[in-house]
Image (cartoon, rainbow, N blue to C red):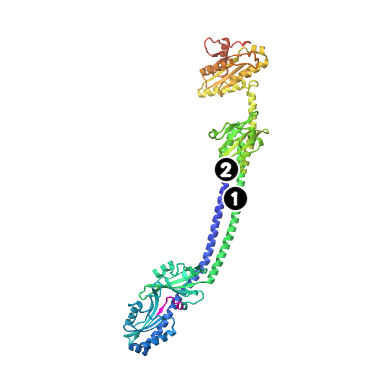
Amino acid sequence: MEDKKTYIRRSVLLWSTLLVISILLGYSIYNAFSSRIYANVLESMNNNLRFAESSYNVFMNQMKMGMLQASVEPNIKELIIRKDVAALKNLLKKWGDHRDYVSDWYVVGKDGSVIASEGKTKNLMIKPPGKSRIQSIIQAALLSGETIMGTELLDSNNSIDGYTLIQYVVVPVMEDEDVSIGAIVTLMDLNGDDNITGKIMNDAGMYSIISAKDRIIASSFESGLYRFNTGNNLPEDIRKEVLEKGGSIVNRLEIYSGGREDNNSYFGAFRPIKDFEGSIIGTQGIIYYDHLAEATFGQIRDFTIIVVILLVAVFSIIVWTYTKIQKILISEKQFSNRLSITKKFSDLVRQASSEDEVYEILFDLLKKKSGITQIIVMKKDYDDKQLVVYKAMDTEKLQSMKSRITIERNCWAIKTGKEFVDNGGNDDFHCKDFYSESESYICLPIILGGMVSGVIQIQSDMKNYFTDDLVAEIKGYIDNITPVISNLRLLENLNNMASVDTLTKVYNRRYLDKYLIEQIEISKENNLHLSILMIDIDFFKMFNDTYGHDAVDYVLMYFADTLKFNVRDGDVVSRYGGEEFVVVLPRTDLRGAYRVAEKLRKKVEQLSLAAINNEDPPKITCSLGIAAYPIHGNSIDKLIESADKALYKAKNSGRNRTCIFGDENEREGVRERSDDR
């Protein structure tokens, strides 16, 4: 069972390991190919970002070149000096007709005040009231005499957040090399200007985004201003990397439109936009959807899934094959182990010298199995209809059970001659006559000589414990012990026949001699007392002459039973010859032996032999002689001789009495036998 669990655990572990390897291998394949494609896309996005930055400055450079050329024309200088507003406005309007991406045109004097303006708003530079950042930059250009261009974050009433990005070019108009008389200023409002962003990057699938701080203010998406998962604000990673750290970033983006997620996956590249003082005031971004890359990603994903499925299938076949092989190997190993155990068990059982020893060998074998909590051997005599507990593995647990378990007609193992299994399930047929606190149990009949002579019951605290394989294994053990038990019982019967008196069913003289030798040796080694009683029925020849042989046989059997039932289990009653009997009392001194002798004498005296003559039942008495080891003899012959002399004394003293060898007035020598004893 443990081996089976082990290879199942190994199979599951192996399959899990191979599954993880398949997934990791698939991930590695997907990651390797997709990383390469991703790297190509990111490299392309970085190039596009640099191109967008260059393209973004094209407009600035165009304005710069045009305004530098205009600033050196004499008529411009003259108009500025004369502050000809109408002429300057016409000139600015003419320039604006050819450059619609410019929001406002200004001509300012040498103090920075506006002389003339034209364009879409005409107030970017002067709103809100007070000096704006653009006016400070104009003053710097007038003082330095150098062209200044860049981007600024200005307050604006047109923006939701109250600010907008302004792209500017300031070209000073110089009277000579050192003195400026004014300047030409162009301002481009990037807030919502998809015209500008569209011209910056207009390739298929490529879009431009401009943000003021972290708020998107311009986009070239076809459907208008798309939003990220954070709305119209930049995602957190872009905001931190670009606005806070001043670096560039290329990443995948989640973009939404109309409240629904766009199925296309976009790439985004962003760079910071800085003002005149170098502070970051916004971002410029390129959004790109690569159809080829996405299609390739899908193909790689599908290919990876197919590879993983194939690997899982191949590895599953490998694990299945491994499991089958392990199952076969374990089955063969279990079969081999079972044969080895059975052979060893069979050898031990054949060497057993008693039925008890056979069951002890069986107990030792079965209790090694995890789950078995109790084994009970129940026997029935030939003429008995009840099963009696003969032996148990756990005697303490047996205390709660009755010694007589059930009667023969209620035992299914005896009635059917087959095993009866109750695995604790609802579908099991429960033996109502059997008392058990176990979850599962099995009863197996002991069949000797073709007849059921007992039952071996095995219990477990586990439900469904007795599987078909385990039942077959246990039955094999039972099959091994039944012929051995049968032979042992036969041998025991033969020994009993040789050791037991045929008429009285007590031990004969042959057994007595053997038993006394053993008891004398035990008493000698352990310094224990040992006493024997020599008992003779008084006037037995006269009784024989009066009532006949049948009555004599009855009296001898009745007399022997009286002796057996009135001594201890460890005491031995033996027929010494004729009407003489010997009782061996181990661990008993003379005083104790005298008490036993008197008890027996009185029990015999009280016997009523109504079976011989109901109207006038005859009575019998007996005389008893006592001898003890070692004071009256240290051998069988000496001990028997001493007890016989004591019995002779009891006979000569009037019969129906008990005498101890060595008492006063005892006659020495061999007693004379008398026919009327």
> Where does the magenta region start and end?
187-196
**Is residue 515 toward the left or the right of residue 107 in the image?**
right
* Amino acid type, callout 1: Gln
Marks 2, 1: nearer the viewer:
2
Residues 83 and 234: in front is 83
The image shows residue 567, relative to residue 139, as above or below, that is: above
Instruction: Give the labeled residue for mark 2.
Output: 463
- In this image, 561 relative to 64: left or right? right
Query: Residue 677, relative to residue 294: is it above or below?
Result: above
On whether residue 190 falls in the magenta region, the answer is: yes
Residue 107: x %, y % from top left:
36, 84
Which residue corresponds to the image point at 58% horizontal and 60% vertical from the top-left?
309
Q: Residue 476, located in which quarter of the rendered image?
A: top right
Front residue of this view, candidates 178 and 387: 387
Identify the mark at residue 326; answer none if there is no mark: 1
Percent position of residue 251, x then y: 47, 68
Residue 223 % position (x, y): 50, 74
Q: Amino acid at mark 2?
A: Lys
Instruction: Indicate whether residue 493 is drawn in magenta.
Output: no
| Residue 355: x %, y % from top left | 61, 31
- Is the residue 260 above or below the residue 637 in the image? below
Query: Neighbour class for label 1 at 10 Å: few (<14), some, many (≥20)?
Result: some
Asked which secondary structure carries label 1, the reply is: helix
